[in-house]
Amino acid sequence: MKNMLRQKILQKRKEMTVEEREGKSNKIIDILCNSESYQKADVVFTYIGMEAEVNTYPLIERAWKDGKKVAVPIAKIKGEMYFVPISSFLELKKSRFGVMEPPKSKNQEILPQKTDFFLVPGSVFDQKGNRYGYGGGYYDRYFQQYLNIYKIAAAFSFQIMEFDLQVETFDIPVDCIVTEKGVIGGSNDEYFD
């Protein structure tokens, strides 16, 4: 069930036109950058969007322009990851998983603080913030180490289900989800207005 739903939504995401994806991505980035969470943050933790995901490149460019530090993940073995600062897209290379990331030799790890902006990827979400990632468990393991992170997901509206996802005890939900149509959850929170 979980894998079938994930595959169905990922296929739908792949079928979007470039124009549709860019238009919706830009709306999502605008909402993110106008949030109190983004405005107050010194560091923006974000993933590097792959071809079918919400395009995070404009968010990163905006953060640099706004004088913020940008940190992106590097995957390690055994499903773990750490975040390092980048100051140029030229630092990124395609990993063996097909993800753009800094070289593994880069080891200036940045640890998230409660006031930082933390963007989370995913394939499927529900209204409560439960998420299906891509099957590696990287973010769930990371969040178990840093419980005070306010987790913001970026997704297209069709990735949000009306029913509750079947999740495991180790699956950690996000605090809010931003789609091109607005914010789901987090509306009464000090971080996201």
Image (tube, rainbow, N blue to C red):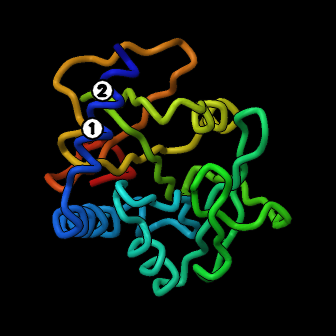
Residue at left offset 62%, top offset 37%? 138
Assess disc 1: are there few (<14), some (14-19) or many (≥20) residues with their C-alpha within 10 Å of its C-alpha: some
Q: Nearer the viewer, residue 104 or 168?
A: 104
Residue at far bottom of view: 65
Whether label 2 touches label 1, CB < 8 Å = yes
Residue 117 drawn above or below residue 122: below
- Compare marks 2 and 1 and give the one earlier in the sequence: 2
Assess disc 2: are there few (<14), some (14-19) or many (≥20) residues with their C-alpha within 10 Å of its C-alpha: some
Which of the 4 image quadrants contains residue 106? bottom right
How many numbered marks does the figure carry? 2
Whole-percent x and y of residue 131? 40, 30
Kindly state the secondary structure of the residue where label 2 is placed.
loop
Whole-percent x and y of residue 8? 27, 31
* Residue, disc 2: 128
Residue at left offset 38%, top offset 27%? 130
Apparent side of residue 121 relative to residue 15 in the rendered image (left or right): right
Kindly state the secondary structure of the residue where label 1 is placed.
loop
Q: Amino acid at mark 2?
A: Lys
- Quarter of the image that includes the C terminus: bottom left
Residue 87 drawn above or below residue 180: below
Whole-percent x and y of residue 29? 31, 66
* Residue, disc 1: 185
Q: Amino acid at mark 1?
A: Gly
Apparent side of residue 181 relative to residue 190 in the rendered image (left or right): left
